[in-house]
């Protein structure tokens, strides 16, 4: 782990929080939990690029969580480290602190200091407005998994909504698969030589302000973010005999405005996200919108079936791995979620996405079921089809996979 992460962490743990913890530990309440998992990915095709693993990929993961509270619950400390050991891809073997945060809760305000994960957004297939935490792409290529972010967050509770003020004190660089790994670009991304627009580099202080409110059956939120762009620009580098051998990361500064909202109308859930981003390279709009309709108790059973439809748009049009553009610039998504509502909490999500400009497609199945009191089994299937080089999905079209994991919760 880079020293800038530890510096950012220390910057978010002021002396008063540490002294409060030291003087209150005798009266604190302690809880511990967590999970341990074994995961196996089986790929249907050989990799597209030299050096990639050909068949299977097995890994082990541990994520404990420790929680202390004191002062009648007003003060608390959460610690959640994360470690994965991958037997094939060395870059996927990594450690991270997902959370290490002190929280003080008053009647109408709350202070959170430390490393945290903050999620914004309402849509299913793309989270445009989720901008605080960096993507942990070696965990999941779809952007669902995030690295811990050092921050100071003051949350103010008002009658007209909740206002959150953020000071983000250390930038986290994105993780990338190594030469052996799957779900990567044609060239391996150099994670040691990183370029920044800001002279402060990864020590740049980012700022964000978010307002959120519930009005009847509607939840809405809006924010402004100013700081280091979480999405790196990849440029060819490391030339040998006139040919690039790697990608170099470049992180520029950005100002981003975001809005998200969802509305419940009977069995319908309408969702919308939109952003405006301004950088030294470009400025653009993007949006994701759709609905989820749920049939409750299908065929007189306990199961619920939900239908999902979303559309993604980006004013930049198509992009590539090295040219800025919208990954979902004109894309349609459809899916179904089946919740059995049984003792084993069995759920299945199926989804299909297509690029209306390039005719590329992706398909997923995510299924999970609890086994006994402490185990959860999950099965994921992901299939890709993209034969046009301009479409980013073409870089991973040989990475069709079946993934099985068994998690033990304690």
Image (cartoon, rainbow, N blue to C red):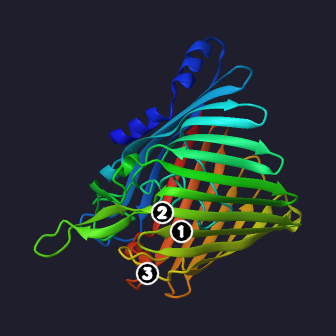
Q: Distance between the residues labelled 1 and 3?
A: 22 Å
Residue that label 2 marks: 254
Q: Is residue 114 above or below residue 401?
A: above
Mark 2 burial class by Cα count in 10 Å: few <14, some 14-19, many 20+: some
* Tag in front: 1 or 3: 1
* Tag in front: 2 or 3: 2
Q: Is residue 293 above or below residue 77?
A: below
- Left or right position of 93 against 133: left
Could you tell me which residue is drawn at 67 percent across and 64 percent down?
259
Whether residue 99 can be seen here: yes
Whichever of callouts 1 and 3 sits on the residue coming sooner in the sequence is: 1
Residue 233 appears in which quarter of the rendering?
bottom left
- Left or right position of 232 against 110: left
Q: Are marks 1 and 2 in contact (CB under 8 Å)?
A: yes
Q: How far apart are marks 2 and 3 (CA)?
A: 25 Å
- Left or right position of 131 against 324: right
Q: Tag 2's secondary structure?
A: strand
Q: Where is residue 353 in the image (x, y as percent from the top left)?
A: 58, 77
Residue that label 1 marks: 277
Q: In this view, does 46 lie above or below 361?
A: above
Q: Where is residue 338 in the image (x, y as percent from the top left)?
A: 73, 63
Mark 3 burial class by Cα count in 10 Å: few <14, some 14-19, many 20+: many
Mark 1 burial class by Cα count in 10 Å: few <14, some 14-19, many 20+: some
């Amino acid at each position: 782990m880079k020293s800038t992460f530890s510096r950012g962490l220390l910057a978010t743990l002021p002396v008063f929080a540490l002294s409060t913890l030291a003087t209150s530990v005798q009266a604190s309440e302690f809880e511990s939990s967590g999970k341990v998992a074994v995961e196996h990915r089986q790929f249907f095709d050989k990799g597209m690029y030299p050096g990639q693993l050909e068949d299977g990929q097995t890994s082990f993961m541990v994520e404990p969580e420790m929680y202390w509270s004191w002062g009648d619950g007003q003060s608390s400390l959460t610690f959640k480290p994360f470690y994965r050991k991958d037997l094939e891809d060395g870059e996927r073997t990594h450690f991270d602190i997902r959370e290490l945060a002190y929280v003080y809760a008053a009647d109408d305000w709350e202070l959170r200091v430390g490393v945290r994960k903050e999620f914004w957004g309402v849509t299913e297939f793309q989270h445009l407005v989720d901008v605080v935490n960096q993507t942990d792409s070696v965990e999941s290529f779809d952007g669902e998994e995030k690295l811990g972010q050092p921050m100071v967050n003051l949350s103010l509770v008002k009658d007209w909504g909740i206002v959150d003020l953020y000071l983000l004190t250390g930038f986290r660089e994105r993780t990338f698969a190594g030469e052996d790994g799957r779900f990567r670009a044609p060239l391996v991304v150099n994670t040691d030589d990183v370029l920044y627009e800001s002279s402060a580099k990864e020590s740049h202080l980012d700022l964000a302000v978010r307002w959120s409110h519930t009005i009847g059956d509607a939840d809405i939120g809006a924010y402004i973010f100013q700081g280091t762009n979480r999405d790196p620009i990849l440029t060819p580098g490391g030339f040998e005999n006139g040919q690039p051998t790697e990608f170099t990361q470049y992180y520029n500064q950005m100002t981003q405005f975001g809005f998200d909202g969802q509305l419940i109308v009977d069995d319908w859930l309408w969702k919308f996200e939109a952003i405006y981003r301004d950088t030294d390279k470009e400025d653009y709009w993007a949006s994701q919108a759709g609905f989820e309709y749920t049939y409750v108790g299908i065929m007189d059973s306990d199961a619920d079936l939900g239908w999902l439809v979303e559309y993604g748009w980006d004013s930049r049009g198509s992009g590539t791995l090295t040219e800025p553009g919208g990954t979902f610039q004109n894309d349609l998504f459809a899916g179904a979620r089946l919740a059995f509502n049984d003792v084993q909490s069995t759920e299945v999500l199926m989804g299909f996405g297509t690029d209306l400009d390039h005719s590329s497609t992706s398909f997923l199945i995510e299924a999970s079921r609890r086994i006994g009191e402490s185990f959860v089994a999950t099965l994921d299937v992901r299939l890709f089809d993209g034969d046009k080089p301009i479409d980013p999905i073409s870089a991973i079209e040989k990475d069709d996979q079946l993934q099985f994991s068994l998690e033990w919760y304690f």
